[in-house]
Amino acid sequence: MKKISLSSLLIIFCFSSIALASVNYPLPTNYKYVNDYVGILGSKEIETIISLGKELEDKTGAQGVVVIIDSTNDVPIEDYAIDLFRNWGIGQKSKDNGLLILVAINDRHWRVEVGRGLEGAIPDALSNRVMESLA
C-alpha cells in the first residue's frame, strides 16, 4: 500500500513540475520598479512609480515592484505572482522584504504579494482588504 501511495505522489509531483515549468515569466525591464509589458502606463505614471519605488528602497531597504502583463495564460494569479516574486528575487534576500503588485489586464485580475519581512507592516489581511475594496 505504501509503495502505491509513494508512486502516486511521485507521478503527481512530476506532472505538477512539468506544468509549472512551462510558464514563461517576463524578464525585468531596466526600470526596476515598474514593468509595463502592455504599454498602458504613460511616462508620468512610470516616473511616479519609479520615484516611489526608489524612495521606498532608499528609506526602508524594501523593494516594491509593479508588473503589468497581458495575461497569466490560465495560471491562477496567486500562483503566477508567487512564482514571479521568487523568480525575480524581489526585495533583499536576507530580509525577504519585497512587495509585488501584479496586474493581468486581459484576465481582469490583480494581486499583491508581500515578502515575509514586510508582513508586519503589510499583513495579508490588509492587502486582501485593499484588493477586495478596489475590485
Image (spheres, rainbow, N blue to C red):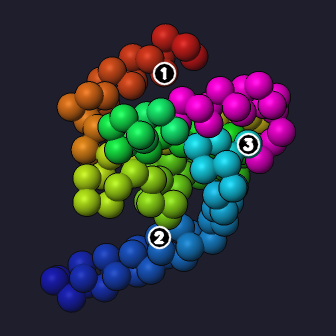
Label number found at residue 16: 2
Q: Which amino acid, by three-letter code, is at mark 2? A: Ser
Q: Position of residue 52 (x, y in %)?
A: 54, 29
Name the quadrant containing residue 26.
bottom right
Q: Which amino acid, by three-letter code, is at mark 1? A: Met
Name the quadrant containing residue 13.
bottom left
Mark 1: few, some, or many residues within 10 Å (few <14, many ≥20)?
Answer: some
Q: Which residue is mark 3?
A: 36
Q: Find numbered disc 1 in the image and state the secondary structure of the residue it sits on.
A: helix
Write the start and end of the magenta stretch as one range.
37-53
Q: Depth-wise, is mark 1 or mark 2 nearer the camera?
A: 1
State which tag comes first along the sequence, 3 or 2. Answer: 2
Between the C-alphas of marks 3 and 2, the distance is 29 Å
One can see residue 109 in this view:
no
Between the C-alphas of marks 1 and 2, the distance is 28 Å
Residue furthest bottom in the image: 3
Mark 3: few, some, or many residues within 10 Å (few <14, many ≥20)?
Answer: some
In the figure, 66 relative to 28: above or below?
A: above
Q: Depth-wise, is mark 3 or mark 2 nearer the camera?
A: 3
Q: Residue at x 47, y 70 (%)?
A: 16
Q: Position of residue 94 (x, y in %)?
A: 25, 60
Magenta residue check for 4 = no
One can see residue 35 in this view:
yes
Mark 3 and mark 1 in contact (Cβ < 8 Å)?
no
Label number found at residue 131: 1
Q: Depth-wise, is mark 1 or mark 3 nearer the camera?
A: 3
In the figure, 134 relative to 51: above or below?
A: above
Q: Find numbered disc 2 in the image and state the secondary structure of the residue it sits on.
A: helix
Task: Locate the N terminus by quadrant.
Answer: bottom left
Q: Residue at x 72, y 26 (%)?
A: 45
